Amino acid sequence: MTRVHYREIEGRSHSYYALLGVLGALILAGLGAAWTMEHQGHAITGMSNRIVWGMPHVFAIFLIVAASGALNVASVASVFGRDAYKPLARLSGLLALTLLAGGLAVLVLDLGRPDRLVVAMTNYNFKSIFAWNIFLYTGFLAVVAVYLLTMFERRMNGYSKRAGLLAFGWRLVLTTGTGSIFGFIVAREAFNSAVLAPQFIAMSLAFGLAVFVLVLLAAYRGRGHSLGDGMLNRLGTLLGIFVAAAFFFVVIYYLTNLYSARQQGMARFFLLDGGIYTALFWAGQVTVGTIAPLVLLFKSGAQRSRQVLTGAAVCVIAGGMAQLYVLIIGGQAFPQLIFPGKEVASSFFDGVVAAYTPSLPEVALGAGGAALALALTALALKLLPFLPQRLADGDADAAPA
Amino acid sequence: MNPDRRQILGWGAAAAAGAVLAPAFRLVELAQARSPQEAASMLTRWGLLIDITKCVDCDECVTACHHENGVTRHGRLETDPQWIRSVKLRDKATGFAQTLPLMCQHCEHPPCVDVCPTGASFKRADGIVLVDKHTCIGCRYCVIACPFGARSFVHETLSDQKADVPRGKGTVESCTMCVQRVDRGETPACVVACNKDGGKAMVFGDLNDPAAEIHRRMHTEPSTQLRADLALDTGVRYQGL
Amino acid sequence: MRYVATLLPLILIVAGLAVAGDIRAQRADAPVIRIEQGGACVAPTAEMRRNHMKMLVHQRDQTVRQGLRDPRFSLKNCVECHASRDTGSVLGKEGFCSSCHAFASVKIDCFECHSALRQGHAAAVPR
């Protein structure tokens, strides 16, 4: 029975500092964007009274959904008892924390009154799923921190199964809550669906694992061959399964909407004549986000090169961003059904597809949040022993600790 | 006592009783203008009845509302707040065209109140749906949740607010049914303007008050709610849709 | 010895900032409190000085949520009375509110939304 030794990364190479430099610059840009938005008002962004949630929310929801899914590897180890994944559990927990922190940072900085964060944390309307999410997100940070503690602290190793179970359940509720932010809304045709909650869970598994794989590959790049192909193949297969599962929910969502006369207009909009949204759906979400990863991961059988795995993960992330853009922004752009059976026109853009162009402050803020998540990850990997020293094939099969 | 004196005494008593009791018949009217130290009451439910067959698309209601509430427009239609707007309808099947004013519907079960994370979006006891700007964090979830697109987000710094209508950058706002006027016993600006310069299409009043014109008309004439299928029980009803 | 090398610069920086802050504070203008309107405030001066923030924070919820509009506690009425005769505002260099708040370095949020200008018709205030 080989013990797994965990180690910090060296973190002294040129590429490491260069990475931190780039991420730092992006974070500063994001902070600058938030400062400008707060002082001059959201008029400087591309968001309007019809499209109130824009690029920052696409980034933020992606990060939050990925955070929940990133914990999956640890859950598979602790909750489902698959010991082969145990060595990766620490990195999994770390990514869950940092991705969530990045997403929350974007959400908070985009608020109209970010100075009122204390108000948001002390006044709760418990009928609001958004209020529940505030609890779920902050609670998730605490639960995963405790879970990591049980893994790091030898004396607490015995509790890691229970902590893992709690974290697993918590993230299912959290992702259900995130999907329900949209699913509970009756005011928008594209949102009001119970299928969004399970769809978000499937999306979280896919996005989270894709980010996890990329971070894992990047972290081990400097170490040569200490990361075995066996583990990577397992992760690649899982990624393919999750992508297929997420796509299943998308398919039934559109099939159901196409079936009813009332919803057909909305389904047609996304699938056929929605302009940018249709393009992003077919090219981004379907082709790049679903077909490409599935082809890459399964066409060559079980043995995949690292390039293939990297490519598949990048495709999943790009497709995921496109999916969220289509859902969040397209869902707001499609006109509200206030007067069924009537053509509508007004000075408030009723009855027409609302226009939206992402602006620089919005993209900077969103990218800044993503950079924050990655920077926190890179720093944490240097400060604490998150990564197994060796994850070659032999170790992967035998390791329990 | 001869019958004539009896009669006179009887009329006199009746007149005296009438004079004494007459103020009581005005209590219902007086109840509308409650004193500043009194809280809004659940017994009242403020509402609007709009007969769109009389709406002549004159925009008087829009101008009056934005003037009363200090909503200045910068000519940027996408980000300027709009508390009320004139909507042009055309039936897809028949081509029949109409216009109507659309504002916050002051629902009994408002989705915007359900979704607000801090409880800033709330319904007052007398049915008026408001935003408590002290607690609003500007998340815009209520803007997404409103089935009527009634809410606006303040995208720019404001500097010339009306003293009775505080509003600020970074918060969400919508029609308040001119709560500052209603609390003084007056009528919302849109209704006043419509009745003065417009098509006389709008009636404002207490839906729970049997003596109010709005109550009487809602009970004797047909009217509909927008998106009645959502079971929101709106305080604003339309006739002629 | 190693700790001195790390701590000394730190201490010097903090001391420097404190001195700079002190110098800045000495240049800060003392608050200008000009009561231009005759009569008394809605409560004694000592109580107003100590508690006006509590009164405002407590009262605003009652006004917004319950529609209680007692003119004694209306911010609009405070402004009506306390606005400067020259500028008509409670903000600005010698504004009634901003003068003290700038000196005390306590940021106020009220006038992001509320008008700081006198409108010219105060509601009758029962004393």
Image: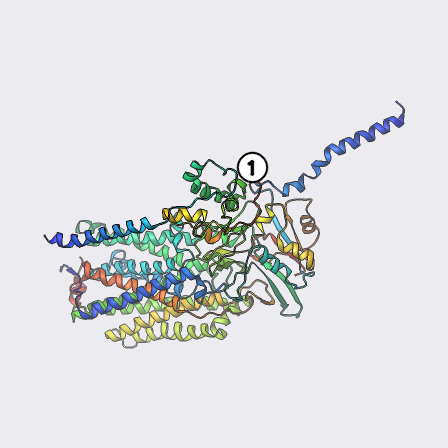
Taking depth in this image into account, of C45 and A342 the one nearest to the observer is: C45
Q: Is residue A308 left or right of residue A278?
A: left
- Other residues around mark 1 within 10 Å, as few (<14) / some (14–19) / many (≥20): few
Taking depth in this image into account, of A270 and A23 the one nearest to the observer is: A23
- Where is residue B111? Give x, y as percent: 51, 54
**Residue at x 83% of width, y 27% of height:** B9
Q: In this view, does C57 lie to the left or right of B191?
A: left
Residue A213 vertical position relative to residue B131 in the rendered view, above or below = below
Residue C74 vertical position relative to residue A213 in the rendered view, above or below = above
Task: Residue lying at the far top in this picture: please name it.
Answer: B1
Residue B209 vertical position relative to residue A296 in the rendered view, above or below = above
Quarter in which the N terminus of chain A is drawn: bottom left
- Where is residue B228? Give x, y as percent: 59, 57
Q: Can residue A62 be seen in this view?
A: no
Q: Quadrant of residue A250?
A: bottom left
- Where is residue B188? Give x, y as percent: 62, 52
Q: What element carries label 1?
A: loop
Residue B185 vertical position relative to residue B103 in the rendered view, above or below = above
- The colour scheme of the drawn protein is rainbow
Q: Can residue B215 be seen in this view?
A: yes
- Where is residue C15? Give x, y as percent: 22, 50
Q: Is residue A49 left or right of residue B216?
A: left
Instruction: Quickly name the residue at label 1.
Output: C126
Taking depth in this image into account, of C12 and B75 the one nearest to the observer is: C12
Taking depth in this image into account, of B236 and A398 the one nearest to the observer is: B236
- The amino acid pointed to by label 1 is Pro
Quarter in which the C terminus of chain A is drawn: bottom left
Q: In which quarter of the image is residue B53?
A: bottom right
Name the chain letter of the residue that bears numbered label 1: C
